[in-house]
Amino acid sequence: MALDQSFVGRSYPPTDPYEVGREKIREFAAAVGDTNPVYSDPEAAKSYGYPDVIAPPTFVFAITFKAAGQVVEDPQLGLDYSRVVHGDQKFAYSRPVRAGDRLSVVSTIESVKSLAGNDVIDIRGEVHDETGEHVVTAWTKLVSRAPEEA
Amino acid sequence: MAAQIQYAEVEVGTELPAASFPVTRATLVQYAGASGDFNPIHWNEKFAKEVGLPDVIAHGMFTMAEAIRVVTDWVGDPGAVVEYGVRFTRPVVVPNDDQGGLIEVTAKVAAKLDDNRVRVDLTAMSAGQKVLGMSRAVVELA
């Protein structure tokens, strides 16, 4: 069933702040095997001009995707999440995410399409820190595959 | 910003050092914990096959995270990445053996932009197939 076009442009309330921890960044960098000291050593990060360790570029996805859950799980939208795959992902950074950030996300539905029976939804997540400074925008394309013919 | 590559020293077509990233079931379990993505298609072979996949597959976001390392390792400062986007075209299949899968990444400078920025186009392959499409980063050089 095609999704309701009237959802295009809808924004959801800002999420409760996610506090970025040094150890969580270290854990993420270790999981992707990245030994760049700017992720684990505050002194190294300072030598690059940052106040504390920074996070790898894709770290913020965990935060924006959780926020996108507001959209995905909106019962009025009716997306069949069991059939959803991740189509595209893009980030535009004003600055890197860093330890100590308290990040809040506003999710907006940018487009809703039906392509060959698949529902395709584009969600933009605007991420700001506690002072209101823009940190990163994340665009996530989700594809809910059409059910197989009975 | 502490990029270690000079804008003036790169040309369109400049190749970045390529890299290969192994991925085993253990890697995926570790990434699931670090990222909070516990979808069973990334660790449960029975479940993956039931939903029509050939085997357990890597998280698309894991592949995306590995691919950008070619850029961040080159430029030195990961904070120099201004934009990064990919399309997930094929999954990285991760067999349950000693070797697992391999993500092979190459990249080159595709365009020189204003403000010391360059666009880098990435190619990520696994088992001879392209796993990321339209994979591009914009990075600010020194």
Image (cartoon, coloured by chain):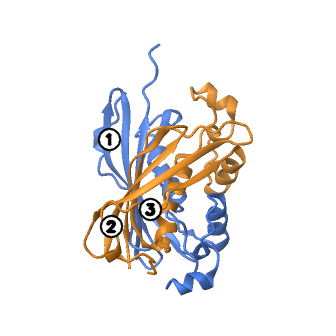
Where disc 3 sits, the SS reads loop
Numbered circle sitting on residue A112: 1
Q: Position of residue A3 (x, y in %)?
A: 35, 35
Q: Position of residue A20 (x, y in %)?
A: 58, 70
Where disc 1 sits, the SS reads strand
Residue denoted by label 3? B16
Residue reaching furthest to the left: B114
Where disc 2 sits, the SS reads strand
Q: Amino acid at mark 2?
A: Val
- In the image: residue A110, left or right of residue A93: left
User: Quarter of the image containing the C terminus of chain B?
Assistant: bottom left
State the residue in front, B48 or A66. Answer: B48
Up-down: is B116 above or below B134? below
The CA span between labels 3 and 2 is 12 Å
Q: Which chain is blue?
A: A
- In the image: residue B3, left or right of residue A82: left
Q: Are marks 3 and 2 in contact (CB under 8 Å)?
A: no
Q: Is circle 3 on the same chain as circle 1?
A: no
Q: Which chain is orange?
A: B
The CA span between labels 3 and 1 is 37 Å
Tag nearer the camera, 3 or 2 = 3
State the residue in front, B142 or B27. Answer: B142
Q: Residue at x 63, y 68 (%)?
A: A35
On the image, which quarter does residue B8 sit in?
Answer: bottom left
Tag nearer the camera, 3 or 1 = 3
On the image, which quarter does residue A126 sit in?
Answer: bottom left
How crowded pointer 1 is (Cα within 10 Å; few <14, some 14-19, many 20+) is rated as many
- In the image: residue B133, left or right of residue B55: left
Q: Amino acid at mark 1?
A: Val
How crowded pointer 3 is (Cα within 10 Å; few <14, some 14-19, many 20+) is rated as some
Residue denoted by label 2? B118
Q: Amino acid at mark 3?
A: Leu
